Amino acid sequence: MSRIRLAYRDNDRTPFIFCVKEMAARHYDVDVEVLHIRGTEEYEAAIFEDAADIIVEHVEYLYAEAASGKRVTLFCAPVLRTEAELVVAPDVRQVSDLLGRKIVIRAQGRPHVTMLRLRAMGLEGQVETQIVPDADVGRWSQWKRVASGASAATFISDEYLPPAIDAGLTVLPAPDVPIVGHYPHACLSAFARANDELMRRYVAAVIHAICLMKYRPDEAMEIVSQEPRRRIGIEDERELRRRFDAIASRLELRPYPTIEAVANSYEVAIAEWPGGKGVNPLTLWDLHWVKQLDDEGFIDELVRRMT
């Protein structure tokens, strides 16, 4: 069995990752070794220092690496939107009610994505923004600043929404923006060139996992209820299923990025890693494994078998 070392940072990604791992072993003769690398510096160095073969989140810094001459490949985009909902104070009934008021932005992740959302709402430059780290309020708990009256709104991952709703806040529909969201894959270009057939099998496993999560959720939950559940730390079965459903609902059957999603993700990347400015973001993407499988009818056949 061939091996791939897959690194991630956030345990919230593990339901998807372990479904990929299981599909790879069951169907494609690939042993996916899942590596949890917590430190940002260590994680960003992983593929360059041979600590991992592939990373599955937090890839925006790679544009700056590419600008410095490093050869990297992005090859899967299973999610093309954000996961965040706009949570507002009880007195906010429409977007115009936010004009001139304060919106809290989570420091972790990609805070510039929120600026793109505000732009799409016509609020860019029309509201006060405040960056608040999780360390000040708890993981994805910026809503507490809204509940206290210190701000009018914030964006919260749909996976962490219930406590905000229980506190009396409401979700205000807000336009999303195309973005390369969770689970983008990246590796060194040299690794991809040297392992073309293995990469094809791994991408097949990714697509198989997506189909499993979307079309056979009960089977996928049997996987998620084991190691992912332990890593996330959720005991309640209903809450675990709610989290799973939120993840599965965002997955794209055909993990191609769109031009708009790549462009927005590149803007987000340059906001935090300006060293990547001037790089054509399309030069990092290699979609031939996805396209081969798609053109051969692999995805359509998977869907037919699972539905």
Image: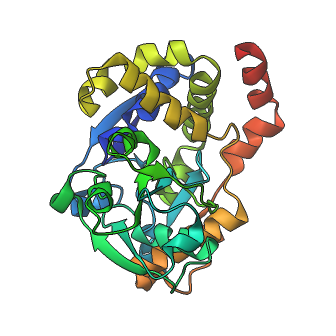
Q: Quadrant of residue 266?
A: bottom right
The single residue placed furthest to the front in the displayed view is: 91
Q: Quadrant of the N terminus?
A: top left
Q: List x then y, in percent, for residue 256.
A: 68, 50
Residue drawn where x is 37% and y is 46% of the image: 168
Q: List x then y, in percent, for residue 53.
A: 39, 47
Q: Nearer the viewer, residue 26 or 29?
A: 26
Q: List x then y, in percent, for residue 98.
A: 49, 72
Q: Is residue 205 left or right of residue 91?
A: right
Q: Is residue 265 left or right of residue 164?
A: right
Q: Is residue 2 visible?
A: no
Disc count in the image? 0
Q: Nearer the viewer, residue 96 or 64?
A: 96
Q: Is residue 247 left or right of residue 42?
A: right
Residue drawn where x is 33% and y is 27% of the image: 228
When the figure is inspected, residue 10 is found, relative to residue 30, above or below; the finding is below
When the figure is inspected, residue 294 is found, relative to residue 129, above or below; the finding is above
When the figure is inspected, residue 174 is found, relative to residue 235, above or below; the finding is below
The single residue placed furthest to the left in the displayed view is: 136
